[in-house]
Image (cartoon, rainbow, N blue to C red):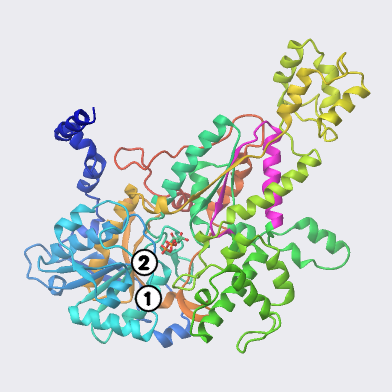
């Protein structure tokens, strides 16, 4: 028997259909690779040049002028056609160049197309141009690990997700030694230019490298990458220079596909609340886009919570003649109450299910947690600066870390403010569940950032929500509304008078489509007592079966499923928007290099508008930098953008969130974004956030 199977398998493997089915590549991949993204009009010209756009203004941080003198006076540049015609004598644009490119930080869909755009433009300008890819992120530059890219490699990854071609890493070139090793590699390779594809920290790195390599004549160009969408660049007057980093649209669409499907599942088996944490670090841009894409019942926006003012508490204090400052901002407990209210309201109309979206950085906006994050960042950074071993190697176990913190209450190490960790902090911190303490003490990444993705935020919130729902249930305030028709039918079928029973059991019997059991009826016993008072018990002295059935249906069970969307969306193949955006970014990078720019970030202006309005730009990085606390000390960095509560996109979500909560009789308002479509006309042409912001700015 076994032999026969083997023979069959051998033959099967020769079958063309089986070969095709088992191939590593499917038709989608083949078609993706063959897709040629449209290019901005200017790139159809044989050559481009750069034109300074004077209208943009920056408020320059003196420290940026101090540390980045060679690139601080850079201006915004527009890429325009040079007027050179095919067949004209070659110019410096066509001079032979060696260009290195590196991915830095987390993967973001579209990175391969940046390489493809750069490669195509470089080869078109001069077939002898050479492009090198540094391997596994900035380590590749420091250690001199790179490969020369050829057409075969580039073609294999066109329009495909991930950073698989040359990989990525999170190392930061932040010490004199790493800087000098990087310079050594770059000079020994004879590079004319280096391209850093990364987030805010990596573009910060690009500026420092541009400064370092300025005298060597090596140009450095940054590219705005991150699914988080937090590189949104404006000038001092609020003019948008870069509306969105690449990868954001794809990640948001991938999360939205999964979350949209959960909306369908949840409203089908009507028994779960799905708690979905979505990536995005501190900013809630991804959560906001997911809200617009899916119309999930509830989407928390961190920036909005930070803005919260408890008016009732404020008023109460005011009437007693003082200001209650604790009324400003949101606490974890208060947030759990808000979530519970929504759950209870939906249950009252028969919907004991739903979908809740939580941005991964929500903790940053919760008062007490934010304070812990800042304090612990400072303590860990101080420890690392003053000891040979770093904090996490010195105290690998939670108990040891807690012990160190406990000792800080009394020992006051030099260089650390004596009030930084007091007995109150210690007490509050020790009241948190251990898994959360562990999360807050988790190792910071190489840039000193708190690693939100490693903290089970949703578990913490859920714990509090479950606790409070249990209280509401005890108090008889959390009940599932019973459809009136269903109640009447059940009672009539059992030969019972719906009206007589109805007034005893329900608090809203006369006027509602969904009936709510009275708050005083919180158990079978209290139900029996209420019926007994009105002589409505059965002849056997028990609660009639039909009434018991109705009562049971009104008792909620809070069942949840938790999900984390991040790495999966980050690895998706890019949307058409991201394919086109990144390919044009690659072309822009080459134009900047071929026209002598350095310390600039490639960007596409008017990204929020239709494709024919897109304008390739070079945006100066240095004037955008400012001082921020990192790893416990002030460092010059590129600012991260958070959700602007005045933006049309947020305002729209705020205006319709009550509707999407759908705590009314009638159906939910879920929207099904569907899968990322690469071909066909139904794929949207840009993120909804961008679209709404563009249209909204006209009103
Ligand atoms: P970048 O900022 O490097 O683009 O990475 C973004 C991100 O995906 C965040 O959304 C997430 O918090 C983090 O990376 C996860 O980091 P890691 O890949 O190290 O687990």
Q: Is residue 92 left or right of residue 683?
A: left
Q: Tell me which numbered mark, 2 or 1, is placed earlier along the sequence.
A: 2
Against 76, is 497 above or below? above
Most foreground residue, 549 or 254: 549
The answer to whether residue 497 is seen in the rendering is yes
Q: Position of residue 321 (x, y in %)?
A: 87, 67
Q: Is residue 344 on the magenta stretch? A: yes
- Name the residue at the bottom extreme: 414
Proximity of marks 2 and 1: CB atoms separated by less than 8 Å: yes
Q: For ligand 1, which image quadrant applies?
A: bottom left
Most foreground residue, 150 or 114: 150
Say whether mark 2 is within 8 Å of ligand 1: yes
Q: What residue is shown with label 1?
A: 205
**Residue 441 location, quadrant:** bottom right
The structure residue drawn at horizontal position 69% and vertical position 47%, both measured from the top left corner, is 466
Mark 2–mark 1 Cα distance, whole angstroms, equals 9 Å
The crowding category of the residue bearing disc 2, from other C-alpha atoms within 10 Å (few below 14, some 14 to 19, many at least 20), is many
Secondary structure beneath dot 2 equals strand
Q: Which mark is residue 547?
A: none
Against 318, is 688 above or below? above
Q: Which residues are magenta?
A: 333-362
Q: Position of residue 368 (x, y in %)?
A: 67, 66
Q: What residue is shown with label 2?
A: 198
């Amino acid at each position: 028997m076994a032999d026969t199977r083997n023979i069959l398998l051998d033959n099967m493997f020769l079958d063309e259909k089986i070969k095709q089915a088992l191939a590593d590549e499917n038709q989608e991949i083949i078609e993706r690779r063959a897709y040629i993204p449209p290019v901005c009009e200017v790139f159809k010209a044989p050559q481009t040049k750069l034109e300074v756009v004077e209208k943009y203004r920056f408020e320059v941080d003196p420290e940026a002028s101090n540390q980045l003198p060679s690139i601080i006076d850079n201006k915004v540049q527009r890429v325009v056609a040079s007027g050179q015609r095919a067949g004209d004598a070659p110019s410096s644009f066509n001079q032979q160049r060696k260009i290195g490119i590196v991915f830095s930080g987390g993967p973001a869909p579209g990175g391969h197309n940046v390489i493809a755009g750069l490669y195509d433009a470089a080869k078109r300008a001069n077939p002898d141009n050479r492009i090198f890819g540094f391997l596994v992120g900035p380590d590749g530059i420091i250690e001199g690990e790179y490969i020369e890219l050829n057409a075969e490699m580039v073609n294999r990854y066109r329009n495909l997700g991930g950073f698989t071609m040359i990989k990525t890493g999170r190392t930061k070139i932040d010490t004199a030694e790493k800087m000098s090793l990087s310079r050594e590699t770059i000079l020994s390779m004879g590079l004319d230019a280096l391209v850093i594809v990364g987030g805010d920290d990596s573009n910060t790195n690009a500026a420092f490298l541009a400064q370092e390599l300025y005298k060597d004549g090596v140009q450095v160009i940054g590219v705005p990458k991150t699914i988080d969408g937090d590189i949104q660049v404006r000038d001092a007057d609020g003019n948008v220079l870069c509306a969105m980093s690449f990868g954001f649209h794809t990640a948001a669409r991938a999360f939205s596909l999964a979350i949209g499907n959960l909306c369908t599942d949840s409203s089908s088996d009507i028994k779960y609340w799905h708690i979905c944490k979505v990536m995005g670090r501190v900013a809630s841009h991804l959560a906001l886009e997911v809200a617009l894409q899916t119309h999930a019942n509830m989407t928390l926006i961190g920036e909005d919570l930070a803005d919260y003012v408890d008016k009732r508490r404020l008023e109460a204090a005011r009437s007693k003649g003082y200001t209650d400052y604790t009324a400003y901002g949101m606490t974890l407990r208060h947030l759990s109450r808000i979530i519970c209210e929504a759950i209870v309201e939906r249950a009252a109309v028969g919907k004991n299910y739903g979908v809740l979206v939580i941005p991964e950085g929500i903790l940053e906006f919760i008062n007490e947690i934010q304070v812990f994050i800042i304090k612990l960042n400072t303590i860990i950074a101080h420890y690392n600066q003053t000891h040979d071993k770093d904090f996490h190697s010195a105290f690998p176990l939670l108990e040891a870390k807690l012990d160190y913190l406990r000792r800080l209450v009394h020992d006051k190490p030099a260089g650390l403010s004596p009030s930084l960790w007091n007995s109150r902090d210690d007490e509050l911190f020790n009241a948190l569940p251990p898994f959360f303490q562990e999360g807050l003490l988790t190792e910071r990444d190489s840039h000193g950032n708190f690693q939100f993705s490693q903290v089970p935020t949703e578990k913490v919130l859920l714990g509090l929500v479950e606790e409070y729902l249990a209280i509401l249930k005890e108090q008889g305030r959390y009940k599932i509304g019973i459809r009136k028709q269903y109640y009447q039918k059940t009672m009539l079928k059992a030969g019972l008078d719906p009206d007589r029973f109805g007034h005893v059991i329900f608090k809203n019997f006369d006027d509602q489509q969904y009936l709510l059991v009275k708050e005083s009826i919180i158990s079978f016993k209290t139900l029996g007592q209420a019926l007994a008072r009105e002589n409505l018990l059965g002849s056997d002295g028990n609660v009639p079966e039909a009434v018991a059935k109705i009562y049971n249906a009104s008792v909620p069970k809070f069942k949840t499923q938790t999900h984390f969307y991040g790495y999966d969306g980050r690895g998706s193949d890019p949307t058409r928007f991201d394919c086109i955006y990144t390919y044009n970014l690659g072309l822009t990078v080459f134009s900047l290099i071929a026209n002598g720019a350095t310390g600039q970030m490639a960007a596409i202006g008017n990204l929020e508008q239709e494709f024919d309005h897109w304008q390739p730009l070079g945006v100066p990085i240095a004037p955008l930098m400012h001082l921020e606390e990192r790893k416990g000390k002030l460092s010059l960095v590129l600012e991260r953008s958070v959700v602007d509560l005045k933006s049309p996109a947020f305002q729209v979500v705020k205006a319709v969130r009550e509707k999407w909560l759908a705590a009314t009789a009638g159906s939910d308002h879920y929207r099904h974004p569907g899968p990322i479509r690469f071909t066909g006309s139904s794929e949207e042409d840009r993120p909804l956030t961008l679209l709404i912001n563009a249209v909204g700015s006209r009103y």
